[in-house]
Image (cartoon, rainbow, N blue to C red):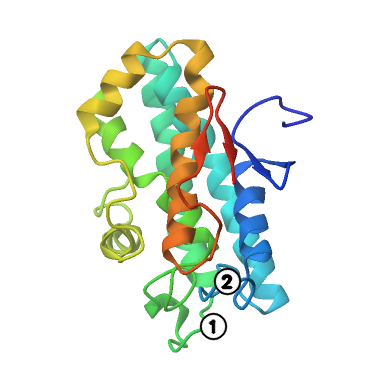
């Protein structure tokens, strides 16, 4: 279990708990690296230490500056709170547009960072996985409060990236796309079930890693009643 925040998701692997979404993704990336147990997928983190640090910085920024408003939008009672939180998320994405594409260079075939199709270069990387997990939720938010979080008019490069990301083989069919079902679940969701809801984005990340060639045992993980995921 999570020893500090007492929340899910938590991954149980070989009887040991690993807490927090980004930490779990990095753990899976290292535990099932290419060549380990038949895994063929490339790492989602760059091999260069500086590039790896940059990727971790932007992934943390997204989870903090987009993830926090996302939670408020979903669970705040007053519409004004939701709209204000949406404005904060939009501002954060504008910062990502201006900074992450410039700072995060490619280790793949594309040498111009601005021309790379993904944050990870020519293939999906750590920042892509973290930000990409919110894309389905952005559509839910738009229907809930009428605010488009990712808009091509404000962040054209991010909007183009989102199209490429969702069209990638590893992503298709993974992100939630039935907006009405998600909203129905939200409306019926009690506080005791919040953890299970918050785990759905993480499950999308996990499944993406599985599809990327990671030979992770039992990619069909068990999601327990408290949002505990087990391998």
Q: Is residue 122 left or right of residue 63?
A: left
Label 1: few (<14), some (14–19) or many (≥20) C-alpha neighbours in 10 Å: some
Total number of numbered discs in the rendering:
2
Work out whether residue 145 can be spotted: no
Above or below, comparing residue 223 to residue 11 in the picture: above
Closer to the camera, 120 or 14? 14
Give the residue at the far right of this rendering.
3
Q: Position of residue 201 (x, y in %)?
A: 45, 40
Secondary-structure class at tag 1: loop
Q: Position of residue 79 (x, y in %)?
A: 34, 15
Above or below, comparing residue 150 to residue 214 in the picture: above
Q: Is residue 204 left or right of residue 43?
A: left
Secondary-structure class at tag 2: loop
Work out whether residue 174 can be spotted: yes
Q: Circle 2 is placed at which residue position?
A: 43
**What label sits on residue 47 in the rendered view?**
none
Q: Circle 1 is placed at which residue position?
A: 107
Q: Position of residue 148 (x, y in %)?
A: 27, 39
Residue sitting at x 22%, y 35%: 178
Quarter of the view holding residue 139: top left
Mark sitting earlier along the chain (2/1): 2
Quarter of the view holding residue 2: top right
């Amino acid at each position: 279990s999570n020893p500090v925040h007492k929340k899910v998701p938590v991954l149980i692997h070989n009887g040991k708990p690993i807490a927090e979404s980004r930490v779990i993704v990095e753990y899976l990336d290292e535990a099932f690296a290419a060549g380990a147990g038949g895994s063929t997928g490339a790492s989602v983190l760059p091999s260069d230490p500086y590039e790896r640090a940059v990727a971790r910085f932007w992934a943390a920024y997204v989870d903090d500056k987009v993830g926090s408003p996302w939670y408020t939008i979903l669970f705040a009672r007053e519409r004004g709170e939701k709209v204000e939180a949406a404005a904060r998320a939009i501002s954060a994405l504008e910062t990502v547009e201006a900074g992450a594409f410039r700072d995060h260079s490619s280790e793949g075939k594309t040498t111009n960072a601005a021309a790379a199709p993904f944050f990870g270069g020519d293939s999906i990387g750590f920042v892509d996985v973290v930000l990409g997990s919110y894309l389905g939720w952005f559509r839910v938010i738009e229907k809930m409060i009428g605010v488009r979080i990712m808009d091509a008019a404000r962040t054209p490069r991010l909007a183009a990236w989102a199209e490429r990301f969702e069209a990638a083989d590893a992503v298709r069919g993974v992100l939630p796309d039935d907006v009405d079902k998600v909203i129905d679940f939200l409306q019926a969701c009690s506080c005791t079930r919040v953890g299970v809801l918050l785990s759905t984005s993480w499950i999308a990340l996990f499944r993406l890693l599985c599809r990327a060639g990671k030979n992770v045992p039992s990619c069909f993980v068990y999601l327990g009643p408290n949002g505990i995921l087990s391998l």
